[in-house]
Amino acid sequence: MEAEELARTLVSALPKGVPGLFNPWADVCGEDLGSNGPAAKQRRLQQHLDCDAEFILCGEAAGWQGMRHTGLAFTSERHVLDGAVPRLVDAPGRLTSRARPFAEPSATLVWRSLYALDIAERVVMWNALPMHPHDRGDPCSNRTPTDAEFTHGRTPLRLLLAAFPRAAVVAVGKKAAEQLVRLGVAPAAAVRHPANGGAQAFAQGLEACVKARRRR
């Protein structure tokens, strides 16, 4: 499946207008500039998917400082502006109206490891729930999705995995691992999420997975 069709298929598999869940490719965020609406985020996703992925990193859910504004898992505005994200051909300038670009700590740790392991060009990143779960009335917050909300992410995750059958799937965090199990998928590795003191464990777990892959 071509990247454009895959991006369109993934996006169309997600619901719209669910209270407490922000859909980056359908909903409009007040902090995003007009040039960074749902269509721009879908184009960015299409470019990200345009590769022969060796690894798929599956996280938990979109965050308010990252995927909400970029349309890409584990990726914040700062990474897009710095040119740290492979395959993005657009140069949009700022994505949000915030005084300083968003820089999600977990995203920074993930990209640091991808470049250190020399796999950044061969990774596709997604989430068990590719929507931003937030507290009612507070879009600038993150919360753990409910089991019912995670069901919204199963079809698009299944479609993504089918599009990259040769890729090793890495679950980042327990919730991602649980979602994969529900789909009957055994991940190549289940690593600690880099947030809340998990940076070193995440980096070590990903490195062990990459080394095991290279020994095959």
Image: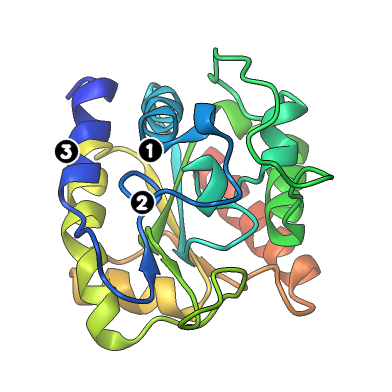
Spatial CA span between label 2 and label 3: 17 Å
* Circle nearer the N terminus (2, 3): 3
Above or below, 70 relative to 46: below
Q: Which mark is residue 50?
A: none
Secondary structure at badge 3 equals helix
Task: From the image, tell me which residue sits under label 1.
Answer: 38
Position of residue 183 in the picture relative to residue 146 (left or right): left
Residue at 37%, 58% in the rendered image: 130
Q: Give neighbour class at mark 1: few <14, some 14-19, many 20+ (Cα, 10 Å).
A: many
Residue at 62%, 19% in the rendered image: 92
**Which is nearer the eye, 211 or 150?**
150
Secondary structure at badge 2 equals loop
Counting from the top left corner in percent of width and height, residue 128 is at 36, 65
Position of residue 166 in the picture relative to residue 61 (left or right): left
Counting from the top left corner in percent of width and height, residue 216 is at 46, 41
Q: Give neighbour class at mark 3: few <14, some 14-19, many 20+ (Cα, 10 Å).
A: some
Q: Residue furthest right?
A: 100
Task: From the image, tell me which residue sits under label 2.
Answer: 27
Above or below, 138 relative to 42: below
**Label 3 vs label 1, nearer the camera:** 1
* Circle nearer the N terminus (3, 1): 3
Residue at 55%, 46% in the rendered image: 69
Counting from the top left corner in percent of width and height, residue 54 is at 44, 35
Mark 3: amino acid = Thr
Q: Are marks 2 and 1 in contact (CB under 8 Å)?
A: yes
Mark 1: amino acid = Pro
Spatial CA span between label 2 and label 1: 7 Å
Q: Give neighbour class at mark 2: few <14, some 14-19, many 20+ (Cα, 10 Å).
A: some
Task: From the image, tell me which residue sits under label 3.
Answer: 9
**Which is nearer the eye, 80 or 117?**
80
Secondary structure at badge 1 equals helix
* Circle nearer the N terminus (2, 1): 2
